[in-house]
Image: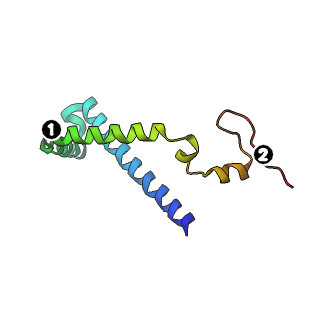
Amino acid sequence: MMDLLERTRRFLWLFVELGFLTILSVILIYLILGDSSGVFVKSVADNVMKFAGAVPTPSLIGFAVIVAIIYLVVQRLPEVRRRGLSSRDKLRSGSRGSRGQTVTTSKE
């Protein structure tokens, strides 16, 4: 069940990234070609400009502060927790430790 949730989360995140990349690509095309870029590109650019203009400045500042806090917290997390592995799983896999040494388990 957890494997299904993890795959679904990854798929949805990939979908969000592709959508964001598409919007950025369309905006880049609009910046390069200007008004001769076509109806679809102009309508997307107009919608982005309307959205950006409608967001009040305090909301943007608050969003930036929240993103900065999340970034700082994630940077302070150990490498093992960022990858979603527990220490026990890392020891079982026999992978390299955080300082490059090989982690092995002894069979008794």
**Which residue is denoted by mark 1 in the rendering?**
57
- Residue position marked by numbered label 2 in the rendering: 104
On the image, which quarter does residue 24 sit in? top left
Q: Which quarter of the figure is the N terminus placed in?
A: bottom right
Residue at far right of view: 108
Q: How is the image coloured?
A: rainbow
Q: Amino acid at mark 1?
A: Thr
From the top left corner, tell me how far across and down residue 89 is, in percent. 66, 53
Q: Nearer the viewer, mark 2 or mark 1?
A: 2
Q: Is residue 106 left or right of residue 37?
A: right
Residue 93 seen by the camera:
yes
- Which residue is nearer to you in this view: 32 or 53? 53
Taking 13 as reference, is 92 left or right?
right
Quadrant showing the C terminus: bottom right
Tell me if mark 2 has few (under 14), some (14-19) or many (20+) residues whose alpha carbon lies within 10 angstroms of its own: some
Report whether residue 25 is seen. no
Image mark for residue 4: none
Q: Secondary structure at mark 1?
A: helix
Looking at the image, which is closer to me, 36 or 9?
Answer: 9
Is residue 48 toward the left or the right of residue 81 in the image? left
Q: Residue at left 39%, top 38%? A: 71
Mark closer to the chain start, 2 or 1: 1
- The residue depicted at 33 percent of the width and 40 percent of the height is 67
